[in-house]
Amino acid sequence: MQELALSVLVFFTSMALDYCHTNFVLAVERRAAYAAALWSVLQWCAGLVGFLVAVKVTLWVLPAEALGLALGTIISIKRNQDK
């Protein structure tokens, strides 16, 4: 059960990581310095959680992380297409 919980945690944090990264890039493109700085800090926070789980606990959560990264990018781009 703990393995499933860790996989879900890593999935959602990696999705948040890529979502933040995509919004960071879009903020830099718009030259919105404060927005880019906020997205950068949020990206670091989300990445730290996934990194700590992968290094401290186990590496088998990496497939869930990869899936979360892909979905985070897709969601962020879809949400920002209309802007």
Image (spheres, rainbow, N blue to C red):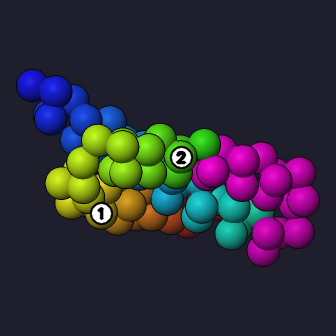
On the picture, is 29 further left or further right than 70?
right
On residue 11, the disc is none
According to the image, label 2 marks what residue? 48
User: Which residue shows up at 38% across the image and 61% down it?
Assistant: 69
Contact (Cβ within 8 Å) of mark 2 with mark 1: no
User: Which residue shows up at 89% across the image and 51% down it?
Assistant: 34
Kind of residue at badge 2 = Leu
The N terminus - image quarter: top left
The C terminus - image quarter: bottom right
Q: Earlier in the sequence, mark 2 or mark 1?
A: 2
Quadrant of the rendered structure where residue 53 is? top left
Position in image of residue 50 (x %, y %): 42, 47
Give the label, 2 or 1, closer to the camera.
2
> In this view, which residue lies farthest toward the top?
1
Q: Is residue 71 visible?
A: no
Which of 36/61 is in front? 61
**At numbered mark 2, what does the secondary structure look like: helix, strand or loop?**
helix
On the picture, is 51 further left or further right than 68?
right
Position in image of residue 17 (x %, y %): 51, 53
Q: Exactly how many numbered labels are in the figure?
A: 2
According to the image, label 1 marks what residue? 66
Q: Which residues are magenta?
A: 28-44
User: Which residue shows up at 24% across the image and 55% down it?
Assistant: 59
Disc 1 packing (10 Å; few <14; some 14–19; many ≥20): some
Quadrant of the rendered structure where residue 66 is? bottom left
Magenta stretch: includes residue 32: yes
User: Which residue shows up at 32% across the image and 36% down it?
Assistant: 9
Name above or below for residue 27 compared with residue 45.
below
Question: How would you classify the magenta stretch by its main secondary structure?
Answer: helix
Magenta stretch: includes residue 5: no
> Marks 2/1: CA distance?
15 Å
On the picture, is 73 further left or further right than 38?
left
